[in-house]
Amino acid sequence: MSAITDFFQKIQNQIVEIQTTINQIKTSWENFQKFWDLFFTLVPWEVLLLLIFSVILLSIFNSISPNTPKANLTIAVLFLGTLWIYFWGLFSTEVSYRKVIVASLYILVPLHAIGIFMWLYGFGKKLYWKKRRMNPKLWDSAIHQVSLDYHQLMGKLHGLHHSIEENRESIEIEIQQLETSLQGIKSLLLKPSGSQKDQSQKDLESI
């Protein structure tokens, strides 16, 4: 009798294990579906298709120009985006340019994010220093900036005196910076003396 009971108990345990396994598979499948639902909510399926075909086209471009993978991928995305719009226009009366542009930006923005950030940083830094050169608040800072720009220009001219023509652009930039600093000196000369004293007093108080 006990043998029969043990037999049915084993069968029951196996059924429970099978049910547990099925539930685990079901849960994993539901989590898998939720993941892809969330993924395609954030990233449209058009982006995935565009990326796949861009990578295929990238392999062709890299065989031609292996040293420019970023530019090759950019060209591939733009080329496929153009083809997408063209064929869409052939089979449909309305073309959603916005969808094509957004799908392309999903790939191009991360691809060029660092470069864009560095460009914006350099551009902002350039504007900041140009403003400081043109509108100095104190004589000391204005004179220091003129002296610094002058010595940088002279150092570059002495270092490149054998190759002035080849480095004309960088030398012109240094000259422009010095001219901007001199304009800052002129702007201070045009300010009333009282305003300069007030500004100096404010700076001393802030210190």
Image (tube, helix red, strand yellow):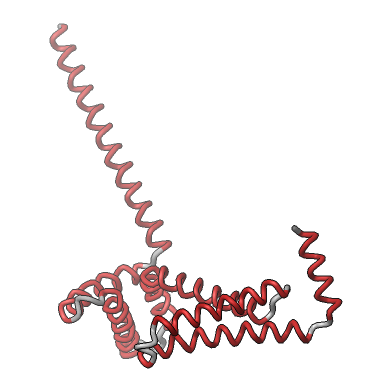
**Vertical position of residue 115 compared to residue 39: above or below:** below
Instruction: State the quadrant of the C terminus.
Output: bottom right
| Percent position of residue 54, x then y | 26, 75
**Vertical position of residue 191 compared to residue 122: above or below:** below
Which residue is nearer to you in this view: 68 or 80? Answer: 68
Splitting the image into 4 quarters, where does residue 107 fall? bottom left
Splitting the image into 4 quarters, where does residue 159 fall? bottom left
The residue depicted at 26 percent of the width and 32 percent of the height is 19
> How many callouts does the rendering have?
0
Task: Tell whether 58 sits left or right of 135.
Answer: left
The residue depicted at 30 percent of the width and 43 percent of the height is 28
- Residue found at the very far bottom of the displayed protein: 165
Task: Tell whether 73 sits left or right of 197.
Answer: left
The residue depicted at 22 percent of the width and 76 percent of the height is 67
| Percent position of residue 136, x then y | 69, 76
| Percent position of residue 96, x then y | 42, 82
Splitting the image into 4 quarters, where does residue 69 fall? bottom left
Instruction: State the quadrant of the N terminus.
Output: top left
Which residue is nearer to you in this view: 86 or 110? Answer: 110
Task: Tell whether 152 sits left or right of 143.
Answer: left
The residue depicted at 42 percent of the width and 62 percent of the height is 42
- Residue found at the very far right of the displayed protein: 194
| Percent position of residue 72, x then y | 26, 78
- Residue found at the very far top of the displayed protein: 1
Which residue is nearer to you in this view: 30 or 139? Answer: 139
**Vertical position of residue 90 compared to residue 114: above or below:** below
